Image (cartoon, rainbow, N blue to C red):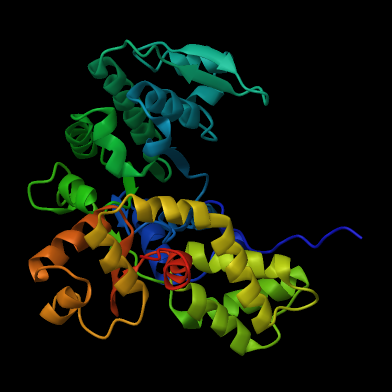
Amino acid sequence: MAPRRNPFDYGGPVSGSQFAGRKAEVAGVVHRMSDHIGVVVTAPRRYGKSSLIRQACVELEQHRPEPAVVSVNLLQTGSLATAAGSLLHRLYQVPGGPWHRLKQVLPGFLRRVRIQPATSFDQNGHPVFTFPAGLAPADLSGVIDDVYEILDEIGARRPAVLFLDEFQAVTDLDAHLPQRLKALADEYRRVSLVLAGSKEHLMESLVISRGAPLYNMLERFNLGPIPEEDWVPFLLRRARAGGKPFADEAVARALWQVAGPVPFDVQRLAYESFNQAGDRIVEAVLRQATAEIIHHDAVDYARTFENLSAGQRRVLKALAGDVTSTPGSAEFAGAVGLADSTSVRKALKALTEAEIVVRRDQGIAVDDPFFAAWLRGTGGAS
């Protein structure tokens, strides 16, 4: 008998039945994209920023005719030349673009672009556009100008969206690109510029803080955790649909309590629990699945831990355990063997910028719950 298909997905952005919670946030983004209003979505890693935008685009298609969405992950492109080629590739695939009315579709499309790329075709017959790495940044940013202008033309008739994911990487491509995007957003008002990014201190300097290149240009959605009351029905529904239901609601709540509140971690533990389960998911399965995840990532956890300073290690282990004093107190500093609260703040700043710890409603916590469990166990022994 063929194995049951796992109903949980944690490997990348999700939408549709795989998407949990955030109804208000999705609706808010859909309304703004429909009205050509720019949006910036910020949150720590694995909170589902890309999934939120993807789900909003899915729902936008249900409410409005053929929205034009061009999306690129800037962290994955690695260079301005690759980003420009990817933007053109995505733009060409937009349904109902003005070039689709031409007899010679591809030449008609390329006539709209000032710098001509080399063109090849992927296995599905779709054109792939590449630019030589030696092109000047000004020429490549001109391609982005062309993409924006064409999207604005489409935006006269239907929603048009330019989505730049992992926007904190933008200055690695071109230090002047944020200022150029501001000028484009000012000029072409029928495009909803949508940005998402995780490294908070970088996003602050690019979009959010006064004096940032895109300050006050975009409406901010700062994602927090998805609450337990949204997660539990989702977990029960998906497991039941996959044919391995939870033994009862309490087990689904226990899963959230182990892995929550980050969407990626909850989906990951649910995925592994479904794989480990027999006919249903019981509490013993949760423990087995958690141990399997920790075993799988133990080498990475050890490498991360070893690369920290001795003081940072002690702070991290204290945060992973039962902290009885606040990290800003003299008591905490003494417990972790640091001179004073200033030394603790420096350690926390480094751990936060490395996205190893994060601030949540209940205080400062180790971001990855499985890393925290590794630290509480034999891992990270001093």
Q: Nearer the viewer, residue 212 or 256?
A: 256
Furthest toward the front, the residue is 382
Q: Quadrant of residue 6?
A: bottom right
What percent of the width, then of the height, locates residue 255?
A: 56, 78
What percent of the width, then of the height, locates residue 248?
A: 67, 88
Indicate left or right for 132 with 124 as reference.
left
What percent of the width, then of the height, locates residue 269?
A: 58, 68
The quarter of the picture where the N terminus appears is bottom right
Indicate left or right for 191 with 107 as reference.
left
For the point 24% across and 27% down, which residue is it?
Answer: 174
Q: Quadrant of residue 117?
A: top left
For the point 55% across and 18% down, which residue is it?
Answer: 105
Indicate left or right for 188 with 330 as reference.
right
Would you place residue 344 above or below residue 117 in this image? below
Q: Nearer the viewer, residue 79 or 118?
A: 79
Would you place residue 323 above or below residue 342 in this image? below
Indicate left or right for 126 with 266 as reference.
right
For the point 62% across and 22% down, which residue is it?
Answer: 122
